[in-house]
Image (cartoon, rainbow, N blue to C red):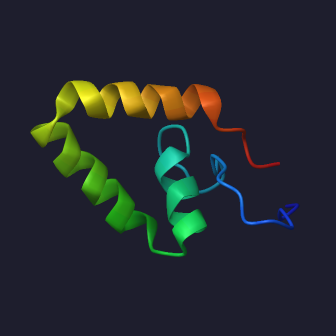
Amino acid sequence: MKMPTQKRLYRDLDSGVISGVCAGVARYFDIDAVWVRAAAIVSLFIATPITLVAYIAAVILLPRMV
């Protein structure tokens, strides 16, 4: 796997469960992906429409990690 030289936000498809957004965010902030996924689930219950729009936008806009 080719690692990016700069710190950039990517979708990590190798570690991802659905589309790699949470895994990519976790890698960017250097934290465990479980915490990012937990925050995403909690956010779904608190602000469902905003969370869904943000997640779909991230899937479309963030490049895949190659």
Residue 66 shown left or right of residue 49 in the figure: right
- x%, y% of residue 13? 64, 46
Residue 44 shown left or right of residue 18 in the figure: left
Find residue 43 and report its image quarter: top left
Residue 33 shown left or right of residue 5 in the figure: left
- x%, y% of residue 40? 30, 48
Q: Height in image: 61 above or below 34?
A: above
15 or 44: nearer the viewer: 44
Q: Quadrant of the N terminus?
A: bottom right
Residue 42 shown left or right of residue 64 in the figure: left
Q: How many marks?
A: 0
Q: Which residue of the protein is positioned furthest toward the left in this rendering?
A: 46
64 or 29: nearer the viewer: 29
34 or 24: nearer the viewer: 24
The residue shown at (72%, 41%) is 64
The residue shown at (54%, 50%) is 16
- x%, y% of residue 52? 32, 28
The residue shown at (67%, 49%) is 10
Q: Height in image: 15 above or below 31?
A: above
Q: Height in image: 19 above or below 37?
A: above
Find residue 46 and report its image quarter: top left
The residue shown at (52%, 57%) is 25
- x%, y% of residue 45? 12, 39
